[in-house]
């Protein structure tokens, strides 16, 4: 039982390059989230999904796209990376609404040069 | 607007008690969470409050006052391993989104 995993753990991109971050969970959770964490700013929600085939925008969605084709996977895409997207990205899942904590993946550290 | 405030840094001594405060103003309220995050790691769940009052879990306790928009996390018998960031987070009405504070970095000294 791996819980929540993220691939890759580290990545360095050049401005304008594209990449996809993968979040996978084996807990059969319905809800999945992508956050970014920057120094002094806490976790900010990028996009989220309440079920397979559904996605919605969070606080800071610009420059990112997501897809949830399978319940266990939530992909975060950067079409044209910018230095402002240098951050640590966390995926999180939760099985239902009120009262359930979010379970976080280990994070992906992305640097855009 | 939505805002969560907590102190940036705190320092305490091993064996002592420390209280980390959190005030919030959000568009709705459906529960308050505290998470612990060690440097370079993911946040991990500590506590959840949805009703007013104190929730105790071992060395950690969390208090909530919804009317005041206020919570605190109390850590007793501090240990060096408690040196970490502590994140206050509020889940909004509807439950889809959780707003996080910037976190409080706690340094425990010998």
Image (spheres, coloured by chain):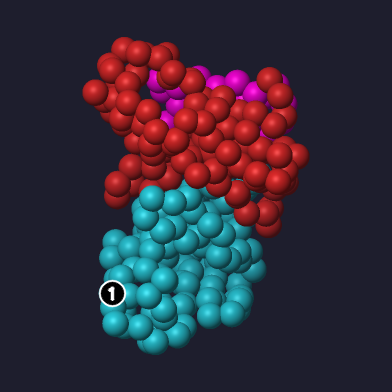
Q: Regarding mark 1 in the picture, which secondary structure is present there?
A: strand
Residue B25 covered by magenta stretch: no
Q: Residue furthest right?
A: A28
Work out whether residue A57 can be spotted. no
> In x, y percent, where is residue B43?
49, 53
Q: Which residues are magenta?
A: A48-68
In the image, B61 versus B52, the foreground residue is B61
Against B39, is B14 above or below? Answer: below
Which residue is at 44% across, 57% downward? B37
Say few, some or many: other residues with alpha carbon within 10 Å of mark 1 (under 14 / 14 to 19 / 20 or more): few
Q: Is residue B76 left or right of A111 when viewed as pictured?
A: right
Q: Position of residue A37 (x, y in %)?
A: 39, 42
Is any atom of residue A103 visible in this view? Answer: yes
Q: Which residue is mark 1?
A: B11
**In the image, which lettered chain appears cyan?**
B
- Chain that is red in the image: A
Report whether B57 appears left or right of A90: right
Q: Is residue B72 above or below residue A29?
A: below
Count of marks placed on residues: 1
Q: Residue at x 29, y 82 (%)?
A: B110
Q: Chain of mark 1?
A: B
Residue at the (47%, 72%) spot, across then down: B73
Q: Position of residue B27 (x, y in %)?
A: 52, 48
Question: Could you tell me residue B61's position as x and y percent?
Answer: 54, 77
Give the position of the C terminus of chain A as an image quadrant: top left
Q: Is residue B110 left or right of residue B15?
A: left
- Vertical position of residue A54 compared to residue A23: above or below: above
Q: Which residue occupies 63% across, 54% down?
A: A101
């Amino acid at each position: 039982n791996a819980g929540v995993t993220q691939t890759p753990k580290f990545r360095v991109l050049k401005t304008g390059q594209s990449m996809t971050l993968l979040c996978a969970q084996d807990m059969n959770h319905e809800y999945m989230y992508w956050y970014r964490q920057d120094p002094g700013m806490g976790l900010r929600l990028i996009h989220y999904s309440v079920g397979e085939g559904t996605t919605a925008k969070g606080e800071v969605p610009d420059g990112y796209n997501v897809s949830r084709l399978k319940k266990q996977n939530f992909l975060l895409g950067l079409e044209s990376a910018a230095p402002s997207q240098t951050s640590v990205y966390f995926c999180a899942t939760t099985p239902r609404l009120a009262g359930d904590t979010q379970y976080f993946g280990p994070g992906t550290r992305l640097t855009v040069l | 607007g939505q805002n969560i405030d907590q102190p940036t840094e705190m320092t305490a001594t091993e064996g002592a008690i420390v209280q980390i405060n959190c005030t919030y103003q959000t568009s709705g309220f459906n529960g308050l969470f505290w998470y612990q995050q060690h440097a370079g790691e993911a946040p991990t769940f500590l506590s959840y409050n949805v009703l007013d009052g104190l929730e105790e879990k071992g060395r950690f306790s969390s208090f909530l006052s919804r009317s005041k928009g206020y919570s605190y996390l109390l850590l007793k018998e501090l240990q060096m391993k408690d040196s970490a960031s502590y994140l206050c987070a509020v889940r909004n009405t509807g439950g889809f989104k959780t707003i996080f504070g910037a976190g409080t970095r706690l340094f425990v000294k010998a």
